[in-house]
Structures are given as C-alpha cells and as structure tokens.
Amino acid sequence: MRLPELVSEGTTELGPLASAAGAHPESLKRLLRHLVHIGLFAEAEPGVFGLTDLSRQLLSEGGTWLRSWLDVEGPGARMDLAFSGMLHSIRTGESSYGVVHGAPFWDDYQRNDGLRRFFGDVMAAHAWQTGPVLAAEVDWESARTVIDVGGGQGALLAEVVRANPHLRGEVLDLPAVAREADQALSEAGLAGQVSFVPGSFFDPLPPGRDVYVVSRVLTDWNDEDAVRILQRCAEAAGDSSRVLVVEVLAGVDHAKYNTSFDLQSLVLLGGQERSVADFEALVDKAGLSLVKSRTWPGGLVVVECRLPR
Ligand SMILES: C[S@@+](CC[C@H](N)C(=O)[O-])C[C@H]1O[C@@H](n2cnc3c(N)ncnc32)[C@H](O)[C@@H]1O
C-alpha cells in the first residue's frame, strides 16, 4: 500500500493516509497499530504516524529489491506465495506453484509480463557475479560462435562477448522473452553481435555452435528434465563443440545460508540445488564427456564438457 512512501511524503494522519492508500480507515488503523507495535512506524501523537529506522531503511536505495519482494501485489510475493503450498511439495517432490496459482510457474511466467520482467531483471542483476569471471577465465580464443541456452535477457552473454569481440552470440529462450531480450541487447549496444533465438531447450537446438552455455538453468528442473536439456545440447553439439554448465551454488557457505533458496527451487519449480558432483553425474547421464570442473570464490561453478571422442 506504499504506506512508508506516503508517510515520508508528508501524509501522516490516518484519514488522509486511508484515502491516499485506498484503504478502509478503521481497518487501516488496526494495521497501523500493529505496524507501530513491530517498529515499522512511530505514533508521535494519536493517529499521527512517522517513520522509524526500519521504515527509513526500507525506503533507502539499498532497500529497492526488498521493497519489490515485499510488495504483496507484486511478482516477488506471487513467487513467495508458492511456499504456502509447501506441504504438497514435501509430499510429492513437485512444485506447488500450480496448486497455489492454478498454473505451473513457467506457464504463468510466459503470460504474465510483470512476473517475467521481474524474474528476468533479478537474473540479469546477477550477471555481474558470473559474467566477468566466465568472460575472463574460460578459453574463448578458439571459439567463434556461442549460444546461451535459456539465456534470458542475455546479460551473461553480453559480458562474455563484450570481453571477446571476435565472438558471435545467440540467446535462446522462450518466445515470450524476445521483447525484453531484444531491448536489453540493443541498450547494451550488442544488437549486431548477439541475436535472440526463440525456442525451447526441450526441442532440438541450433546445431554446430562452438560453445553451448547452460547457466543457472538446471537448478530450475528435476534430474530427469535437467538431463533432457543437456541431451538437447549433446545432440546439437559438433565434435569440437563445448558445453558449459554454469551455476552459482553448492559452496558450503552457500548451502549454510541459502537453504531457503533450495526450498524455493522446490516449491516454485520442482527444481533443486546441486553439488559439483551432482552436475557431473547429470552431464554423464546426458551422454557428454566431462573435460573439467572449476569453481571460483562466491560459489561460481563451471562444468565443461564435450561429446565423447
Ligand atoms: C533462472 S533463469 C537463468 C537465466 C540466465 N541463463 C542466467 O544465467 O541468468 C532460467 C531461464 O530459463 C528460461 N526458460 C524456462 N523454460 C524454458 C524453455 N522451455 N526453453 C528455453 N528457455 C526456458 C527462462 O525464460 C529463464 O530465462
């Protein structure tokens, strides 16, 4: 309801706050009483509200992501609501998103522009973590073409091709993502170097690219589907192609502090976090040959594989 924003802009009394927020005044009064109790607002005199350290923190620049996740009518809350069906997930091993929202996450994502953009922006915001390392530490010299399978808005590939201008890139993702990806690539000044390929990674992929990147995708899927995605890469790869599985996971610290992320993968998508050994096992099941696995501080893992010789 943007109550902290309204209070910080000077709407501090119950009546005007209720009108500005579109609220039932008596009910808002009860809510505000609770929010004062938990420290989000101060009530300097009866019915007049002010900010506290907590609401100031929420309004600060550093609180931007938190604000969007806490927006009960926003896409972050829509995703978090999948947790309300967690019992279904724990009993079945399946996502509970469809039980809560009436359609599986990826269906909802394709038709709900706000949800898709939010999700894409969250992923793109993480490219700073993976992109520069992937661009600098993987051997791109011998490659000419690279396709990022499930590459979203192309933020990761953008980092790679910017650092390696000899590369020609493609981002393959669901057709619904085309508009956001085209816009992001053109804003990055890369429209001539990277193109968007609409499609599904469960269907045959464009063949013969030098490198197939599969970044932060396998975690969204159970083992069976993850192997299917890698099989599509194996079928499309040529003898000299490489398949790079990229994830930011599995560090001991990550596991310690992000157990909730693993549960989020489960309830939202029926996916799971995995260790390097788990990824190597998936690669093997998909008929690919492991070349090497490398990890970097921060939990970045790159599993490099090829077709068996
Ligand atoms: C967790 S995001 C990872 C995005 C990006 N690779 C990265 O590292 O930031 C998963 C991506 O998979 C895409 N995706 C989901 N289902 C897909 C499908 N069947 N075919 C292709 N892409 C799909 C989503 O649109 C999304 O961009």
Image: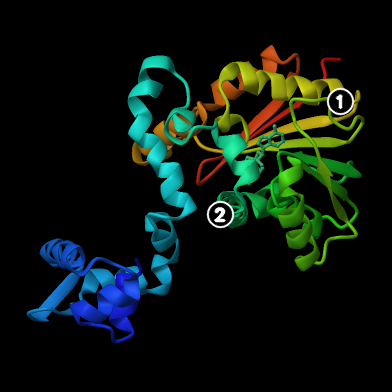
Q: Is residue 162 left or right of residue 293?
A: right
Residue 56 shows up from this direction:
no
Q: Quadrant of ligand 1?
A: top right
Q: Quadrant of residue 104?
A: top right
Is label 1 in a helix, a strand or a loop?
A: helix
In percent of the image, x 45 and y 43: which residue is there? 79
In percent of the image, x 56 and y 31: which residue is there? 219
Q: Position of residue 214 (x, y in %)?
A: 70, 35
Q: Position of residue 117 (x, y in %)?
A: 61, 54
Tag 1 residue: 236
Task: Name the mark on residue 118.
Answer: 2
Which of the pair 124/145 is nearer the observer? 124
Q: Position of residue 36 (x, y in %)?
A: 14, 67
Is label 2 in a helix, a strand or a loop?
A: helix
Task: Name the mark on residue 16.
Answer: none
- Amino acid at dot 2: Phe
Q: How is the image coloured?
A: rainbow
Q: CA distance from mark 1 to mark 2?
A: 31 Å
Which of the pair 141/100 is nearer the observer? 100
Which of the pair 61/8 is nearer the observer? 8
In percent of the image, x 38 and y 22: which residue is there? 88
- Amino acid at dot 1: Ala
Residue 204 shows up from this direction:
yes
Image position of 80 with respect to 292: above or below: below
Crowding near the residue tagged with mark 2, few <14, some 14–19, many ≥20 C-alpha atoms within 10 Å = some
Closer to the chain start, of discs 1 and 2, is 2
